[in-house]
Each structure stands twice: as C-alpha cells, then as structure tokens.
Image (cartoon, grey):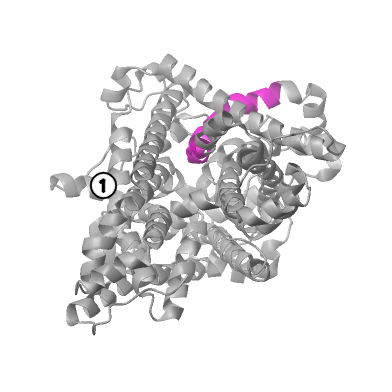
Amino acid sequence: MTGPVSPATEPNRSDRRAELMLGALASVVLVLIAGMLVFVLTKAWPSFSHNGLAWFGSGGNVDDQLIDIFNSPANPDKYEYTLHAWPLLYATALVTVGAVAIGLSFALFAAIFIVEFAPDRLRAVLEPVVRLLAAVPSVIYGLIGILVLVPFVGNHLIGTETKKSVAYVVQLSGNSMLVAVVILTVMITPIMIALIVDALRAVPGSWTEGAHALGANRWRVVWTIAVRAARPAIVGACVLATARALGEAIMLSMVSGSVGFAPNPLDGLTFFVEPMRPLAATIVDNAEGLSVKPLGQTLYAFAAVLLVSSLFLSLGAWAVRQPMKRYGVRP
Amino acid sequence: MEAATATTPVRPAPATGSGWRRTDRIFVGVCWATGILLCLIAGSLVLFMLVKGLQFLSVNLLTTHPVSDLDQSKTGGFLDPLIGTVILAVLGTLIALPLGVGAAVWLTEYGRPSWLARAVESGIEMVAGTPSIVLAIFGLLLFSQQFLSFLSFTAAGNAVFGRSFFAAGAMMSLIALPLIFGATRSALQAIPGHVREASYALGKTKAATIRRVLLPMSREGVATGTALGMGRIAGDTAIVVILLGATLRLQGVGDVPVVGTLRGTGSTLTSYVYNNSPAGEGNAPDKAYAAAFVLLMVVIALNFGIDLITSRRGRRA
C-alpha cells in the first residue's frame, strides 16, 4: 500500500483547518484512554497500597473481607481495606483460559470447514449463523444458562452424595465453573471463527495452488499452508476473544455462582461443578456498594487489574505478531 | 471487490477420501462435526427463544409500563425498557458516529504526524479491548465530577449522582466507536487511489474531495459499522446496570421534557432481563424470556439490515 495521495496544489486554509479538526477529533480517543488510566488507577490506589503484594495472594474468605470493607467505620482513618483477591483472580484465569482453549480448537476446525470443506449451500447457512451467534447479547446467554443449564447440572450431573460431601465447605447448586466455561465458549468462539475465516480467505491462491500441484491433498494444503500463513490473525483472534472473556461480567455473575471460592483441581470431577466468581462479575454483584468509599476503591482496584491486563494483552499480541508478520498474511 | 474474485482459489477435483491418510480423513471428519455442531447450537438457541418468546409475549407487554410487584402476573410490561434501549442506541451512535468517522478519515487521508496516527490506531484497538464493565465504572467516576453535574442530577449533600442516559450513552459510544471506525476505514481504504487523483485533477481541495467524493462512496461501510455498533449497544448490560441506575421506569429530572429524561435514569431491555432473571431481584422468568425474545429480534433485525447493506454494495460493484 502506498501512502495517502495528496493534491499537487498547496493546501489552502480551509483544508488545513479540516486536517486539524479531524486530527483533534481522533486525538480525543487518546485523551480518553489516558483519562481512564489515571482516574481508575488513582481511585484504586488505596486498596493496593494498604495490602501491598498480599492483595494478589490468598488467605481468608474473600466474601467476608468484602463485607468487612463494606461495613467499615465512617472515620476515613479507620477504613477497612484488607483483601486477598486470589480466588477471584484464579476464577477469572480459569474461565478465561478454559473458554479460549476450547474455543480456539473449535474455531479453527469450524473456520477450515467453512472455507474449505463445506458444500456451498451449507456455507451459505453457516456464515450468517456465525454472525448471529456473535451478536446475541450476553444477557440472553446468561438467561438460558441460569434457567436451563444450571438447573440441569444441579439436578442431573451432581449427585446428592457429592453435594453432601462438600456441604461444609461450599454449596453445589449447579452454578458452576462448567456452565460458565461452556457458555463463555459459545460466546467467544463465533468471534474467533469470523476472524480466522477472513484470514484463511486472504491467503494468496497461488500458495495453495502450488501445494496442490505438488500433490498434497486438500486437508494437508489447508493445514500446512493456509493455517500457517494465517497464524498472526489467529493470534489476533485469540487476543480479542481473551479480552472479551476477561471482561464478561453479566453472564458470569448470573451463572458462576457468585461465591468467592477457588475451585480445587484435587477434588476430581467435583472441581468442574464448584461455584466461583471472576473479577468482572464481582464488580457487578457489588455495584450497589460503589458509593461506600472503601468498597468503591476496592472495586476500582478490580477494574484496574482488568484494565491493565487488557492493555498488556493488546501489547503482547502486537509483540507476538511482529516476527510472524513477515511470513504470514494479515487480512 | 475485484480483488476478491481474483484471489478465489481454484478448487482441485473434490476427491475427498480415497487414498488419503487415515489421520487426514479423521481431521476432515472433525471439521464436519464442528460445522454441524455450530448449526445445532444456533438452531436450538433461536428455536428455544422463539418457543419461550411466543409463549410469554403479548402485545400488552410491549405497551404497558412496568410495575414492581412480587407477583409475576402483576409486574406490567416493558414499555419503558424498550424506549430506554432505543434512546441509548440512538444517543450512543450519535456520539460515536462523528468520532469514529472523523478518526477514520483523518487516519486514512491525512495520518500526519505518523506517530500520532499510530497512537490513535492502537488507542482505538485498546478501547475495543477494554471490558465494558471497566468503561462503566470509569464513566461513573467521570460523570460524578462536579463540573459534569448538569448531565445527571445532584443528590442531597452536593454529591453528583453520575447515573443518567447521558452518562450511559457517552460510555456506550465507546463500545460502538471501534466498530464504526473499523468499517469506515476499510471502506475508505477500498476506494482506489485514482478516484482521489481524478478529484484533485479537477482542482478540488482535499477537504472537498473527502466531503463530496470519499464520504459518499463509503456510505455503506459507515452504515454497516453503525448497525453493528447499535447491536452492541442494544446488547450491553454492564453499562446499563451501573451507569443508567436501572430504575424500572424512566425517571426524568427537572421540567424540561427531553433533556429531563436524558438527565434521568431508566432501564433497557438488557437490564430488564437481568433484573427479572433469578440473578436479579424481580425473579419473573416469564417476563425475562419475553423481553429477551424482543431483544433477540432487535439484534437479528439489525443483522438482517447489515446483510441488506452489504448485498446492495455487492450488486453495485
């Protein structure tokens, strides 16, 4: 691509003014981002500074700590800030990684199917279907989750024995990691499929034709040529999906159980049906407490963690794409 | 468009199977399975919502105001949330449209200095990656500032409430912004350079070229982005729950009719569904299903609109 073409004549005054105005409009976005970082981080600072690195550690019951913060005395010197947010961070990582890992493998095969193997009529159906699934609001997924999947898991997948055996630690009601990951996967996979399909289509025809001419079959050509060339776009799709999963609040607050509990992998199969509560959902659940100053600051600390991790995510994706870009195709 | 037809791969004879390695055949089978599973998921989702929606939806629900009551049959309809969704979608797009289109035009047509262009580009990417819940509580912080109190209302004790249609709309515009920006930019980039050169050769200035030639040519791109953005705004819940107050009815502030409503609080279909699900206080699943069905129809209609726009563009090219 060549740079923007410019008229040969000297730019006149009105032209100059238009450029400045549009440039200013574009810069508004930068001011907003800077403002957001500054506002959220300053507001969140007391929560971090009172706890130090222990903020990220585990210890005690998060829900009790949040209640203590909510009930802290009115005297600003005696505000309660003690918080060990590990269960929330762990829950966020667990659902995000789970959903993105399942979603990626699923999306890759689905995208290859749409681009390469689907009969034309099925493809004409699949493409709108993917767009539709990507556009369905998260609250609808949440509603189906809480009214259909959660009761199903609670009544059929968890035996009474299992419920009794852990009743002294946590209640198993069907609001669980399993439902959260399943629905989150359904939510983020369509985005990945759409992006990977675009990337696979952008692979130059001559590359795949060359491989066909060498006698490779259709699967080999897609897998070894097209998918490899599309790697930067696949990384981009993963990042976008991770960002979406990290920030999903409403659906997760509806189905994940809203208990600050860290599911334990040592529990065997019960691990999958244990309740939890990711960061974003915690903010929504405690939204009424935002006006209580110390709790508000704690919630802004959660937001700061989400904000910083999504910034690092974009940065990381950019860094990963750089060396890959030379060999790959970017749609 | 021409480029797309040129790169369509020449398909070899579709001999799938015979003489393939077993692993290859298994992988193709997995591809088929995922494709069909995708159709099944989407089909069952739409069918389920259709059955539940038609079961619980009635015209009454669309035209009566919601009432808070413990008995599900007495909670009224969802006229106010419906209006709230429309207000927010329009308000959000109205703010995002000039911002997104302006930024896209500046970036593709001027883009000087280049460091600023790069910064704006990655800035918009960052906005796209920011969770809406973070945008929501940032908005609450921003609109609780004293100097923005005219956009919401001041409660007792001189604290600014910070929750209003204005506040929610402004933050919603940030959700729509990356979509409008992206669609406009790719539309502008698809216009060949000779079109610009022809305009300059006629003695037009750059600003006139943008206004008279480039923007009309990228109209469909802008429309697609706007429809996508409206869909995202209509479907967002976090911002509504935190920044709109999620009061059941529209509660205006002051006496000025339109501005009063916009300064006041309300709800949208999404927050209505959330509050009426077992997760909220209402616990009226029938109403939640009905409202979710209406919401789904709105989203599908917007999607259909996008298809219409793109197919028209395809026919013209």
* Range shown magenta: A131-155
Residue B175: x %, y % from top left: 42, 53
What residue appears at the point 39 percent right and 44 percent down from the top-left corner?
A: B314
What residue appears at the point 45 percent right and 57 percent down from the top-left corner?
A: B135
Residue sitting nearer the eye, A259 or B173: B173
User: Up-down: is A117 above or below A297?
Assistant: above
Chain letter for mark 1, please. Answer: B
User: Up-down: is A90 above or below A19?
Assistant: above
Badge 1 crowding class, 10 Å Cα cut-off, few under 14, some 14 to 19, many 20 or more, is many
Residue sitting nearer the eye, A2 or B170: A2
For numbered disc 1, what is the local secondary structure?
Answer: loop
Q: Is residue B164 visible?
A: no
Q: Does A283 sit left or right of B146 as displayed?
A: right
What residue appears at the point 24 percent right and 82 percent down from the top-left corner?
A: A11
A132 falls in the magenta region: yes
A72 falls in the magenta region: no
Q: Which three-letter amino acid code belongs to the residue tagged 1? A: Gly
User: Up-down: is A37 above or below A267?
Assistant: below
> What residue is shown with label 1?
B264
